[in-house]
Amino acid sequence: MLLIIGCVLLVLWLLGFFVFKKVVGGLIHILLVIALIAILIHFLGAGGAHIS
């Protein structure tokens, strides 16, 4: 779940960086930080284990 959220935020960051670079500014980098934190929590915190 966190991996999907991280990937979506990363894609939104890339889209925002290249399309809306002048409009949004710092908000784009906040998305990048949140995406990286979500991905790191997924791999380090959960250990890649899935709860069923």
Image (cartoon, grey):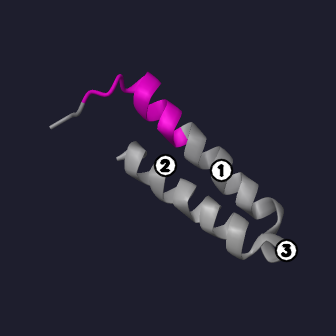
Q: Earlier in the sequence, mark 3 or mark 2?
A: 2
Q: Give the secondary structure at mark 2.
A: helix
Q: Residue at x 70, y 68 (%)?
A: 18
Q: Mark 3: few, some, or many residues within 10 Å (few <14, many ≥20)? A: few
Q: Which residue is mark 3?
A: 22
Mark 3 to mark 2 CA distance (whole Å): 24 Å
Type of amino acid under label 2 = Gly
Residue 50 sits inside the magenta stretch: no
Point out residue 51 in the picture as x, y percentages from the top left corner: 21, 34
Q: Are marks 3 and 1 in contact (CB under 8 Å)?
A: no
> Which quadrant of the figure contains the C terminus?
top left
Q: Farthest left residue?
A: 52
Q: Earlier in the sequence, mark 1 or mark 2?
A: 2
Type of amino acid under label 3 = Lys
What type of secondary structure mainly makes up the magenta span?
Answer: helix
Residue 39 sits inside the magenta stretch: yes
Q: Which region of the structure is painted magenta?
A: 38-49
Instruction: Say left or right for 15 vs 3.
Output: right
Q: Is residue 10 above or below residue 49?
A: below
Q: Mark 1: few, some, or many residues within 10 Å (few <14, many ≥20)? A: many
Q: Give the secondary structure at mark 1.
A: helix
Q: Which residue is mark 2?
A: 6
Q: Residue at x 82, y 60 (%)?
A: 26
Q: Earlier in the sequence, mark 3 or mark 1?
A: 3
Q: Which residue is mark 1?
A: 32
Instruction: Say left or right for 49 vs 27.
Output: left
Point out residue 19 in the picture as x, y percentages from the top left corner: 69, 75
Q: Residue at x 62, y 61 (%)?
A: 14
